[in-house]
Image: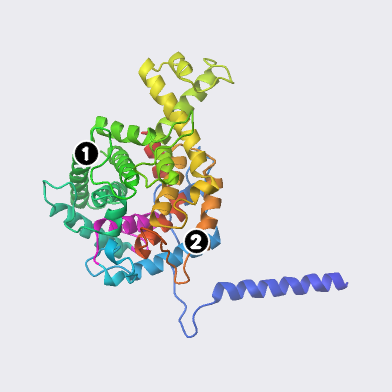
Amino acid sequence: MKTWKFSLLTFFAASAILLFGFSVRKFGEPQKKTKPFVPPKGCVFRTVMGEESSDLNSIYKTPENVQRSVDLGLSWIIRAQNQNGGWGAGSHGRQDILDPHAVQADPATTAMVSMALLRSGSTLKEGKYSTQLQKALEYLMKATENSDVNSYNITELTGTQIQSKLGQNIDVILTAQFFSNVLEHAGHDATLKRRIQKNLNTCVEKIQGAQDSNGNIAGAGWAGVLQSSFAANALESAQANGANVDEKALERSREAQKNNFDAKTGSVKTDMGAGVMLYSVSGSARASAKEARRVEEEINKAKKSGTLAQNAPATAENLEKIGFDKDDAMKYSTAYEVYNSAKVQAQRDDVMDGFGSNGGEEFLSYLQTGESMIIGKDNAWQQWYDNISGRMLKIQNNDGSWNGHHCITSPVFCTATSLLILSINNDIASLTEIGRK
């Protein structure tokens, strides 16, 4: 009888706590009516809720504590937007300035924030921050349209934190990535979509013009390997979205990143990565993910058909057996080895420590590792996400922002990158599509 009374009391107490938790709001604040959440096309939530099928077993719904962290970050970063629609990281010479309204807007930082808003659920038509996203898009399109045709970049601003640490042409690279990401959300306005596409092609032309014969981008900064790595990503995404990408330029970009890592010896080239292994191996994993996925899929198909034995490894010899020509077989088998070794290296605790403290470069590297695993349809990404989300939540500031403690210290840039990491599961559909094309 006592047990029954205790259980009943526990039930009522728990119910009261739950009801209280769902109704808490600021004192005197009226209850706001909210519209039911409708997941955007291709959103992971559709798959989780059974509305779309997916053969990727790594579907992962955002944990509540992570979502709270994301919401806090979004709220902070929205307040940091400038009147012209952009966001800024500030100059390399004044890293002590942390007030986002005391620095000039720059395209690189604006593009990163815009991608974070997009990945977090806002589009050009819908979402809590749709208006802010529209303003940011206009800022970036004007920067591109007004840029010097003979320049490799889209801004005359120099000496920003992002340029000094990643490279002089990072603005055009990150802006191109944003244009690719936002294109599918411009279907409601044909004129706007054509304008975005034109600006994307302008950015692609500038990126390819800045590429050297080895596939790296001119004007490398302290961690120039990241500029070149993100250039490869931008070209890959642009190609997937119909831009005028030179296949040879894209191939050179990928090869430059893959060549930074020797899968057989485990040695890493860090001469363009400030001597930090993390910056290089994350780029190697990202650049080889798409090719590694093709190898995995073709080998598995051959095993199912009986062309290869069930224990057959993904070697160049076996790829030739199933139809790859000799050169492609060697290229793809190398990419497969690089990806599977580099992704492991990039997740080692000692490697993830990067330069020794958290900076924007570390956050960018984490982002690349996660995206590479989703592009490669690697179901181990969920373990990566659990690890990295725990790491990111521990270092979030009380006001919802993140900031670096070396090199790229900008709270705006670091917060945007952190949001992209924590909301990466919302982009499973688009990232896996990049890997398929």
Percent x, y of residue 257: 36, 36
Provide the residue span drawn in magenta.
Answer: 104-129
Callout 1, which amino acid?
Gln
Check whether the beta carbons of the residues at disc 2 and disc 1 lie within 8 A of each other: no
- Which quadrant would the C terminus be assigned to in this image? top left
Q: Residue furthest bottom?
A: 28
Indicate the position of residue 291 as horizontal and vertical percent values. Answer: 40, 30
**Number of residues whose C-alpha sits closer than 10 Å to that of mark 1, classed few (under 14), some (14–19) or many (20 or more):** many
- The three-letter code of the residue at mark 2 reads Gln
Q: Is residue 22 above or below residue 356?
A: below
Residue drawn at the location 50% of the way across and 40% of the way down: 345
Instruction: Name the mark on residue 328.
Output: none
Residue behind mark 2? 67
Element under disc 1: helix
Q: Residues within 10 Å of mark 2 (few under 14, many from 20)?
A: some
The disc label shown at residue 208, or none: 1
State the image quarter where residue 104 is shown. Answer: bottom left
* Magenta stretch encompasses residue 113: yes
- Whether residue 283 is in magenta: the answer is no
- The x, y position of residue 60, in whole percent, is 53, 49
